[in-house]
Amino acid sequence: MRYTLFLYNDESAFSDMGETEMGEALAAYGAYITQLRDAGVFVDTDYLAPSSSATVLSLADGVRQIQDGPYADTREQLGGYFVIDVPDLDTALDWAEKCPSAQYGKIEVRPSAMPPEESDRHGKGG
């Protein structure tokens, strides 16, 4: 079953990092990706530009509305995600616990509602 691990972090912590600290953080994520791949559960990942670069679109009431900046005005913002393919929620939680983001942010673990054959048809197969 596929799960997406949504990584929520305080963006200001990253903007205050020096080059050495950023290199260490990137190395930690690289090691985590290697672990996921070696275990055969890795499907996809991406990290996102700061939430201040976001544009939010809504068609509420049939009217196109555009808003600059993040949808949620909170301290922690969605910073990236991992998609993994594992047998169950307990295994997904074990992988979430190993993610570097768990040490300083929050990780939302959510199962996919798309059947695997539908995902494969759209080019997102693992």
Image (spheres, helix red, strand yellow):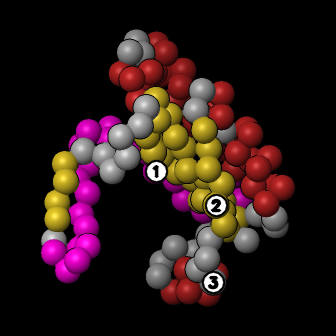
- The local crowd at label 3, few if under 14, some if 14 to 19, many if 20 or more residues have their Cα within 10 Å, is few
Q: Residue at x 61, y 77 (%)?
A: 113
The furthest residue to the front:
61
Res 73 quadrant in image: top left
- Please state which amino acid type lies under the numbered disc 1: Asp
Q: Residue at x 17, y 65 (%)?
A: 65
Name the quarter where the C terminus is drawn.
bottom right
Foreground mark, 1 or 3, reads 3
Foreground mark, 2 or 3, reads 2
Identify the mark nearer the N-term, 2 or 3.
2
Q: Residue at x 64, y 81 (%)?
A: 116
C-alpha gap between disc 1 and disc 3: 22 Å
Foreground mark, 1 or 2, reads 2
Reply above or below: 3 against 10: below
Which label number is shown at residue 115? 3
Q: Which residue is mark 2?
A: 110
Q: Is residue 26 visible?
A: yes
Q: Which residue is mark 1?
A: 46
- Please state which amino acid type lies under the numbered disc 2: Arg
Task: Please say whether residue 59 is one of the residues in the magenta stretch.
Answer: yes
- Please state which amino acid type lies under the numbered disc 3: Pro
Res 3 quadrant in image: bottom right
Q: What residue range appears in magenta? A: 37-63
Reply above or below: 50 against 5: above
